[in-house]
Amino acid sequence: RHRLKMNMFDRSINFDALFKFSQISRSTQQHLKNVYSSLAVCMFVAGAGAYVHVVTRLFQGGVLSLLGSLGMMAWLAMTPHCPETEKKRLGILAGFAFFTGVGLGPVMDFVIAINPSIIVTAFLGTSIIFACFTMSALYAQRRSYLFLGGTLMSGLSLLFLLSLFNMFFGSVMLFKAHMYIGLMLMCGFVLFDTQLIIEKAEMGDKDYIWHCVDLFLDFVTIFRKLMVILAMNEKEKKKEKK
C-alpha cells in the first residue's frame, strides 16, 4: 500500500496534455491567446479607471462614463479590423476599458462604505468563476454550449422586466433575485461567448479585439453583481449584530 501511495505521488503532471485542446485548430488557439492577452490589458486599464474615480474624483462615474464607453464601443465597431488599424483599435479598446472602469466607481463607493475588502474578495471570486467557466467551454465538445443562446436571451428579457417591475415596488427581495439570477446568467454567457468566439475564429473571423469586448463585458458584469451581493450580505450581518 505504501509503495502504491509513493507511485501515485511520483507521477508528474503533463501540463502539455492538460492544455491541449485537440478540437481547436492551431490558428484559433493563437487567436484565443490574443483575445485573453487583450482581456488582461483591459482589466488593468479598467482598474486604473476605477482608481481614478475612487481616489482622484477627476472623472465621476455615471452618465458621462456610460456615454464615453458606449461612444468608444461604437467607434471600435465602425473601425474595420485590419493590420493597418490594429494599433488604433487597441487604443480605442483601452479607452473603452478605462471608461468602463470609471463606470464601476459609484458601485465601488457603495462597497467601500460597507467594507473595502469586499472589492478584493469580489475580484478573486470573479476571476475563479470566469476561469472555471472558460475552461469548461474550452474543454467541452465544440458547439455544445451554443444552444444556450436562446435561453440566455430569454433570461435577459426576464431580468429587464423584473427591474422595470421593481422600479414601482422597490422590493429588496426582488432586487436580490435580480442580482442572483443575473450572476447565473452571466456565468452562462461566459460559456456561450467563449464557444461562439471559437466558432467565429474557425470560420475565419479573427477580430480578437472585438471578441475581447464580449468577454470583458461578461467579466465586468459578474464582478459588479458579485460586489453588490457581498456588500448586501455584509450589511445584513452588521444589522443583525446591532
Image (cartoon, grey):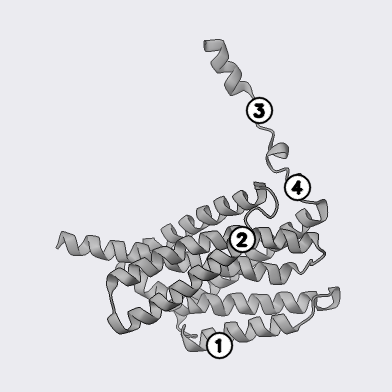
Q: Secondary structure at mark 4?
A: loop
Seen in the picture, residue 236 relative to 10 is either above or below; the reply is below
Circle 2/circle 3 CB separation < 8 Å? no
Residue 23 is tagged as 4
Of marks 3 and 1, which one's residue comes earlier in the chain?
Answer: 3
Residue 38 x, y percent position in the rendering:
68, 65
Q: CA distance from mark 4 to mark 2?
A: 17 Å
* N-terminal label among 2 and 3: 3
* Whether label 3 touches label 1, CB < 8 Å: no
Query: Between 194 and 130, which is closer to the camera in this rendering?
Result: 194
**Going from the N terminus, do you reach mark 4 or mark 3 first?**
3
Report helix, strand or loop for mark 2.
helix
Q: Would you say 34 lies left or right of 230 here?
A: right
Q: CA distance from mark 4 to mark 1?
A: 40 Å
Residue 192 circle label: 2
2 vs 1, front mark: 2
Residue at image position (37%, 61%) is 117
Q: Are marks 2 and 1 in contact (CB under 8 Å)?
A: no
Disc 2 versus disc 1: distance between alpha carbons? 27 Å
Q: Residues within 10 Å of mark 1 (few under 14, many from 20)?
A: some
Horizontal side of residue 74 vs 99, given as left or right: right
Q: Hey, what amino acid is under mark 3? A: Ser
How far from the left and from the top, in percent, is residue 22?
76, 44
CA distance separating discs 2 and 3: 33 Å
Query: Mark 3 or 1, which is nearer the eye?
Result: 1
Query: Which amino acid lies under the numbered mark 2 shown in the image of this protein?
Result: Phe
The percent coordinates of residue 130 (x first, y second) are 55, 56
Q: Secondary structure at mark 1?
A: helix
